[in-house]
Amino acid sequence: MILENIIAQLPYSKPFLFVDELLQVDENSVIGSYTFKEDLDFYKGHFKDNPVTPGVILTETMAQIGMVCLGIYLLGNNFNKDSVIAFTSADMQFLKPVYPNEKVTVTSQKTFFRFGKLKCDVVMTNEAGQEVCKGVLAGMITNKL
């Protein structure tokens, strides 16, 4: 599966798409990146005069790259317009702030994938290679009702 095809199948669009590119994906892992542009709306109010990317947005970015992109790859031709990868849990540690115009890289390792459940260990690093957050994300793959 071509990496751009995975991104095209994501159920998100701007301003809520947090995947710029996928660098690598296989049956056990995915690596992708995103740059937080300074004109994103949440920066206007998330710390006046000192904008910082909210943790919930960092978690969403890690979920989109580290869980949803990997889930689409794992499902292959079984992923279609009726498929949903629902976020079920997160256990995150936030280690460093992410500022506007920072590019981050997300690396995800599959812990398990069975019975429609996907669990991953996920790490986000900045351009200096420093961990900014890490954690465990889980989701459930199902079809729309």
Image (cartoon, rainbow, N blue to C red):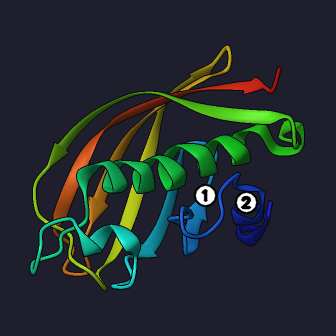
Q: Which residue is mark 1?
A: 25
Where's residue 3, x and y in %? Answer: 70, 67
Question: Going by the image, does 123 lie left or right of 61?
Answer: left
> Does dot 1 land on a helix, a strand or a loop?
strand
Amino acid under disc 1: Val
Mark in the foreground, 2 or 1: 2
In depth, the one of 31 and 97 nearer the eye is 97
Name the N-terminal-most of marks 2 and 1: 2
Q: Residues within 10 Å of mark 1 (few under 14, many from 20)?
A: many
> Does dot 2 land on a helix, a strand or a loop?
helix
Where's residue 144, x and y in %? Answer: 81, 26
The residue sitting at 32% across, 56% down in the picture is: 58
Task: Look at the picture and state if 102 lies above or below 2.
Answer: below
In depth, the one of 125 and 40 nearer the eye is 40
Task: Look at the picture and state if 80 lies above or below 106.
Answer: above
Quadrant location, the N terminus: bottom right
Task: Look at the picture and state if 56 lies above or below 18.
Answer: above
The residue sitting at 33% across, 85% down in the picture is: 38
Q: Splitting the image into 4 quarters, where does residue 10 fall?
A: bottom right
Question: Going by the image, does 78 lie left or right of 111?
Answer: right
Residue 6 is labelled as: 2
Where's residue 129, x and y in %? Answer: 21, 73
Question: Going by the image, does 118 lie left or right of 43?
Answer: right
